Amino acid sequence: MVAAFKAIQAASPEGKLKAAKKEAEELSTALDEAKQAAEDLKSAFNDYDNAVKALEDCTKGTQEWRDALREVNNEVLGLLSEYPELATMTNDAGEKAITYGENGEMVVADWAKEELLNKANTAIVNTQTAATLGNQNVREAQIKVDKKDFANSLNKIYGTEGTSFD
């Protein structure tokens, strides 16, 4: 009996509105997460690029250079930890995403950075589309609830039954 009541309630305009709102909220959260993931990726690549620049600015063989080399490699290891697909990515020419430079520094190919950033941006666009559709579903469900409430109000005022605006 309880299951039947819940099924009827879920199928009602109010139940559909509640479900649409929940889905829209989840999609909004997913959009925020996709945006944050893209920002984190950009930030990680900026940190890597800054470490490479610092290495390039050092005199080879000095302690400062060795520290900068270690920092570049640590940045790449951090990238690999967060984005393990970098370890196995290759482009159409068969080049690996991660290689080693002449001084032993780990190098992230520009094409690999671009590919990951494009994937992150595509995820944002796809999630934005889904969130927009979710919000549209909420608006449509709200209209149905409002129509039902309006019809019920008219029925009470005029004592009629069966008035509907579907």
Image (spheres, rainbow, N blue to C red):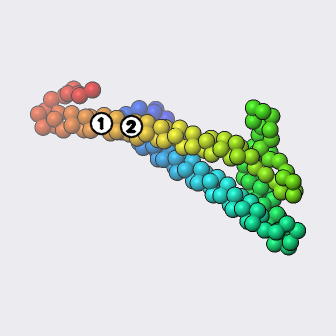
* x, y percent for residue 79: 74, 54
* Residue bearing the label numbered 2: 136
Residue 6 visible in the shown view:
no
Q: Residue furthest bottom?
A: 63
Q: Quadrant of residue 5?
A: top left
Q: Position of residue 141 (x, y in %)?
A: 35, 36
From the viewer's side, name the closer residue of 61 and 19. Answer: 61
Q: Residue at x 17, y 33 (%)?
A: 155
The 10 Å Cα crowd at callout 1, few under 14, some 14 to 19, many 20 or more, is some
Marking on residue 143: 1
For label 2, the SS is helix
In the foreground, 123 or 143: 123
Residue at horizontal 87 percent and vertical 54 percent from the top: 102
Q: Nearer the viewer, mark 1 or mark 2?
A: 2
- Which kind of residue does numbered mark 2 sit on? Gln
For the point 48% across and 47% down, which residue is it?
28
Please provide percent x and percent y for residue 111.
Answer: 70, 42
Task: Give the answer, above or below, for where 55 lies relative to 100.
Answer: below
Task: Give the number of callouts.
Answer: 2
The residue sitting at 29% across, 36% down in the picture is: 143
User: Nearest the camera: 81 or 139?
Assistant: 81
Query: Does 100 sit above or below residue 15?
Result: below
* Left/right of residue 141 with respect to residue 110 in the rendered view: left
Vertically, is 65 above or below 115?
Answer: below
Q: Nearer the viewer, residue 87 or 32?
A: 87
Q: Quick check: 116 left or right of 162?
A: right
The local secondary structure at tag 1 comes to helix
